[in-house]
Amino acid sequence: MRAPFATAVAIGVGLVILLGYFMPIPILQNARSLLLDWAVILSSVALLVAIFNLFFVHFRRLAAPKRRDYYSLFLIIGFVMTLVIGLIFGSTDPQYQRVVTSIQMPIEASLMAILALSLAYASLRLFQRRSGVLAVIFAISAVVFLILFSGLLSVGNSLPLIREVTAFLQRLPVAGARGILLGIALGSLTTGLRVLLAADRPYSG
């Protein structure tokens, strides 16, 4: 077995956290809380390293002698301004949150609009290449939900039939999101069990 010490540590930590979650023993619960706190600290440090790595990557692109990427300048300015203002006023300051939200929300809306158009274009291309049943269902569903969330059907909400159909269609994305979350949960559970059983050893290099 490669890296037996790392495997033993991973299995031991996983068992302590799992037992501390299901068994009301003070020692196990304290050990579980301590290990989870360490995991949160390590994840935060890894996130900081990733953020500063992104900053230095764009700084190197901006300082390159040839083919400079001037779009990186906007990222660096935004990063420095957000960091400095957040350190001065704090992340809980209402004005700071209002400024960040007023920038973040239009960007998210633009990305969602691009995603919607990309899905519509992909459905049309898929329908052109493959005229099977799945392609037809995907194309029809993409067009229906684009029309639904564009607000065009809101004029017919006074009619009971259209109102019921619209409410039913609006519940479908929620059901799909729950299915995705269930799939993520089952995948995470399977991965955790494989690590506990030493079937997967990503820490062994």
Image: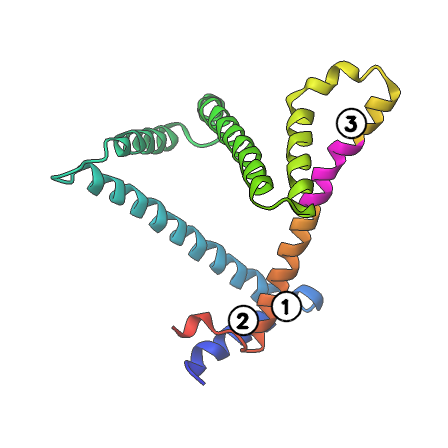
Return the residue at label 3: 166
Which residue is identified by label 1? Answer: 18
Judged left or right of residue 29, residue 43 is left
Type of amino acid at the residue the image marks with label 3: Thr
Dominant secondary structure of the residues highlighted in magenta in the image: helix
- Among the 4 quarters of the image, the one containing residue 122: top right
Check disc 2: other Cα within 10 Å, few if <14, some if 14-19, many if 20+.
some
Say whether residue 17 is visible: no
Closer to the eye: label 2 or 3:
3
> Which residue was labeled with disc 2?
13
Residue closer to the observer: 183 or 123: 123
Kind of residue indicated by mark 1:
Leu
Residue 172 counted in the magenta span: yes
Which residue in the rendered view is the most extreme toward the left?
65
**Disc number at residue 7?**
none
33 is higher (above) or lower (below) than 201: above
Q: Earlier in the sequence, mark 2 or mark 1?
A: 2
Q: In which quadrant of the rendered view does residue 99 lie?
A: top left
Check whether the beta carbons of the residues at disc 1 and disc 3 lie within 8 A of each other: no
State the extent of the magenta-drawn residues as a range: 168-177
Residue 93: within the magenta?
Answer: no
Left or right of 180 in this view: 121: left
Q: Secondary structure at mark 1?
A: helix
Q: Position of residue 141 (x, y in %)?
A: 68, 36
Within 10 Å of disc 3 (Cα), the crowding (few <14, some 14-19, many 20+) is some
Q: Residue type at mark 2? A: Val
What residue is drawn where x is 46% and y is 21%?
95
Q: Nearer the viewer, residue 30 or 176?
A: 176
